[in-house]
C-alpha cells in the first residue's frame, strides 16, 4: 500500500460503517456501488464460519476505492491493520473507534469459530472411535454367529445318530416285543418313541437352519412361479384333505431365483394352509403380481388363522402357536421359511388379521442380485 | 443277503443289525475300516454298509481300498452318513459307492431297498462287463 493511498484513506472522515450480515463464506473482496447519496465502498470479508460486509459512503470513486480497501484491511485478520502502518494523527477518531469495534467483534467471532472447529474435530474423533468399535463388535457378532451355527450343526449331527438308534430300536421293541409288555409298559415305550421322533424332527430342522447360506449364483435361474406351484401341487397331493382344494391364479409372476429355495417355502406355506385348517372345504389360494421390480406371491388359506398380535411370534424358532400336540410339526417351519426367503433377497410376512384364515406374502426381487441377497444375509446374521 | 456293517458307533451298528435280521438278512459288524477290510476279504459279504466319519480311515479311504483290492472290488458299497457330504458326493460315487443314505432319515424299508438294489445293479454290471470281456462265451 503506497503513502498516497494511505493518505487518501485517512481523508474519509465521518463515514458510517455498517456490519450488514453474517453467514458462511470464504469470499473476500472489495467493490464499489453508485448510490444517489454518493458512492458506496463495500468490503466483504469471510472468516471461518462467518463473514461481514462493511459499507462506507464517499463522494468520489477514488475515495470510495480507498475506503473499501481500508475496510477490507480492517476486517481481514490476515491483512491486518498494523498500528505502525497508519499515518499518525490523520485518521478521524470516529471512524477509528467504529473500526475497532468491528475488528473486536470479528476477532471474538473468529475465536468462537476456532472453538467450534475444535469441538467438531473432537466430535469427529469420537465418531471415528465409535465407528471402529461398531465394526469390531459387528465382526465379533458375525464370528459368534458362525461359531454358533457350526456348533448347532455339529451338535445336531452328533446327536442325530444316537437318537436314530433310540427311535429305531424302541420301534422294533414295540413291534416285535410289544406283546410281552402290559399296557402301562407299552405306553411308556410309545412315549419314548414319540419323543425320540420329535427330537429327530427338531434336529433335522436345526440342521437345515444351520446350513442355510446365501445361494450360489449358478443355482439361480429365471422361472415362472406357476411352474414351481404346479410341481408342489403334484408332490403334496397326499397332504391335501379329501374335500380340500388349491386355487391357483392365472397370472403368477416370473422370477430369477434359486427355484429349490422358493419351492421349499411355498410348499411349507401350502401344506400349513391345510394342516391348520378345520374348514368344511379347506382351500389354499395362490395369487401373485409384480410391482416395481418386486414379485409378490400370496398364499391364502381359510384355516384357523393367526391373531395379529401373534403374527411376528409365528416366525420364531420352534414356536408352536397351537397347543394341539396331535398336529405334527416342530414349529420351525416358518422360521426356516422366512430365513430362506431372506437368504434370496426377499421377505415373508403375514398380511392382515382374520378369523377366517391366514394370508402369507412372499416378496422377491424379480431380478436376482447377489448383493441384495448378501445384504439380507447380513441382516439375518444380525437378527437371529 | 449277507451284509457287512462297518461303523464305529456300536449303537448304530446294533440298530442296522436289528433292522436287517428281522428282515431275514445275515449281518456281520466291523467297528472300524481296517477291521472292515479284513472281514470283507474273509466273509465275502453280498453288500457292505459303511459310515463316512470314522477314526483312522474315513469311509472314502476304506471304499477306495476295498475297490482297489481284487478280493473285495466286486462287493457293492452303500454309504450311511450322519452328515451331508456336499462336494464329496462325486468323489464317493467315483470311488465306487453305489448309494449314499442319511442316518437321520433312514427307515428300515429304505435301507433294505437300497441294499437290495445295490446288489442287483452290481450283479447286472458284472454280467455286462463279462459280456464285453468275453463276447465269444455268450
Image: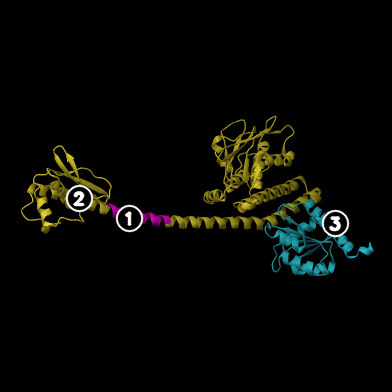
Chain colours: A yellow, B cyan
Residue A120 lies within the magenta run = yes
| Residue marked by disc 3 | B120
Q: Nearer the viewer, residue B125 or B27?
A: B125
Label 2 vs label 3, nearer the camera: 2
| Residue marked by disc 1 | A121
Q: What is the C-alpha distance between the residues marked 2 and 3?
A: 100 Å
Dot 1, how many residues are within 10 Å of its Cα: few (below 14), some (14-19), or many (20+)? few
Secondary-structure class at tag 3:
helix
Q: What is the C-alpha distance between the residues marked 3 and 1?
A: 79 Å
Quadrant location, the N terminus of chain A = bottom left
Secondary-structure class at tag 2:
helix
Chain on which label 2 sits:
A
> Magenta residues?
A116-131
Marks 3, 1 in one chain: no
Position of residue B54 relative to residue A80, above or below, is: below
> Residue B103 appears at what percent x and percent y?
72, 55
> Residue A263 appears at what percent x and percent y?
66, 44
Amino acid at each position: 500500500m503506497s503513502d498516497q493511498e494511505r493518505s487518501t484513506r485517512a481523508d474519509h472522515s465521518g463515514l458510517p460503517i455498517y456490519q450488514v450480515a453474517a453467514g458462511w463464506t470464504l469470499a473476500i473482496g472489495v467493490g464499489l456501488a453508485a448510490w444517489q447519496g454518493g458512492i458506496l465502498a463495500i468490503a466483504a470479508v469471510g472468516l471461518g464460519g462467518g463473514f461481514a460486509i462493511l459499507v462506507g459512503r464517499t463522494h468520489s470513486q477514488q475515495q470510495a476505492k480507498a475506503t473499501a480497501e481500508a475496510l477490507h484491511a480492517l476486517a481481514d485478520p490476515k491483512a491486518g491493520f498494523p498500528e505502525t502502518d497508519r499515518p499518525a494523527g490523520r485518521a478521524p477518531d470516529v471512524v477509528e473507534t467504529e473500526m475497532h469495534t468491528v475488528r473486536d467483534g470479528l476477532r471474538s467471532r473468529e475465536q468462537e469459530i476456532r472453538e467450534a472447529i475444535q469441538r467438531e474435530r473432537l466430535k469427529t474423533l469420537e465418531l471415528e472411535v465409535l465407528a471402529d468399535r461398531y465394526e469390531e463388535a459387528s465382526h465379533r457378532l458375525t464370528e459368534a454367529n458362525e461359531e454358533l451355527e457350526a456348533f448347532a450343526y455339529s451338535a445336531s449331527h452328533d446327536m442325530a445318530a444316537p437318537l436314530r438308534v433310540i427311535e429305531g430300536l424302541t420301534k422294533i421293541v414295540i413291534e416285535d416285543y410289544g406283546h410281552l409288555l402290559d399296557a402301562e409298559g407299552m405306553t411308556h415305550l410309545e412315549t419314548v418313541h414319540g419323543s425320540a421322533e420329535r427330537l429327530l424332527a427338531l434336529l433335522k430342522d436345526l440342521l437345515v437352519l444351520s446350513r442355510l447360506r446365501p445361494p450360489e449364483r449358478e443355482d439361480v435361474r429365471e422361472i415362472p412361479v406357476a411352474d414351481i406351484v404346479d410341481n408342489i401341487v403334484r408332490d403334496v397331493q397326499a397332504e391335501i384333505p379329501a374335500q380340500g382344494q388349491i386355487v391357483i391364479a392365472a397370472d403368477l409372476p416370473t422370477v430369477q431365483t434359486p427355484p429349490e429355495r422358493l419351492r421349499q417355502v411355498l410348499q411349507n406355506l401350502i401344506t400349513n394352509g391345510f394342516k391348520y385348517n378345520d374348514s368344511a372345504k379347506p382351500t389354499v389360494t395362490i395369487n401373485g403380481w409384480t410391482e416395481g421390480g418386486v414379485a409378490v406371491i400370496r398364499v391364502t388359506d381359510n384355516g384357523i388363522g393367526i391373531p395379529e398380535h401373534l403374527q411376528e411370534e409365528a416366525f420364531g424358532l420352534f414356536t408352536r402357536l397351537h397347543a394341539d400336540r396331535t398336529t405334527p410339526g416342530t414349529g420351525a417351519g416358518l422360521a426356516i421359511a422366512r430365513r430362506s426367503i431372506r437368504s434370496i433377497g426377499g421377505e415373508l410376512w403375514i398380511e392382515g388379521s382374520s378369523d377366517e384364515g391366514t394370508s402369507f406374502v412372499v416378496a422377491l426381487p424379480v431380478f436376482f442380485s447377489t448383493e441384495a441377497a448378501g445384504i439380507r444375509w447380513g441382516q439375518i446374521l444380525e437378527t437371529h | 443277503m449277507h451284509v457287512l456293517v462297518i461303523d464305529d458307533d456300536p449303537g448304530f451298528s446294533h440298530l442296522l443289525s436289528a433292522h436287517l435280521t428281522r428282515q431275514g438278512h445275515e449281518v456281520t459288524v466291523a467297528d472300524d475300516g481296517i477291521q472292515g477290510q479284513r472281514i470283507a476279504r474273509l466273509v465275502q459279504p453280498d453288500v457292505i454298509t459303511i459310515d463316512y466319519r470314522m477314526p483312522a480311515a474315513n469311509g472314502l479311504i476304506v471304499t477306495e481300498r476295498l475297490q482297489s483290492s481284487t478280493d473285495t472290488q466286486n462287493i457293492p458299497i452303500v454309504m450311511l452318513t450322519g452328515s451331508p457330504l456336499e462336494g464329496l458326493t462325486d468323489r464317493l460315487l467315483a470311488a465306487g459307492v453305489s448309494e449314499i443314505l442319511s442316518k437321520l432319515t433312514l427307515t428300515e424299508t429304505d435301507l433294505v431297498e437300497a441294499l437290495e438294489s445295490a446288489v442287483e445293479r452290481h450283479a447286472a454290471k458284472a454280467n455286462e462287463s463279462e459280456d464285453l470281456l468275453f463276447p465269444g462265451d455268450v
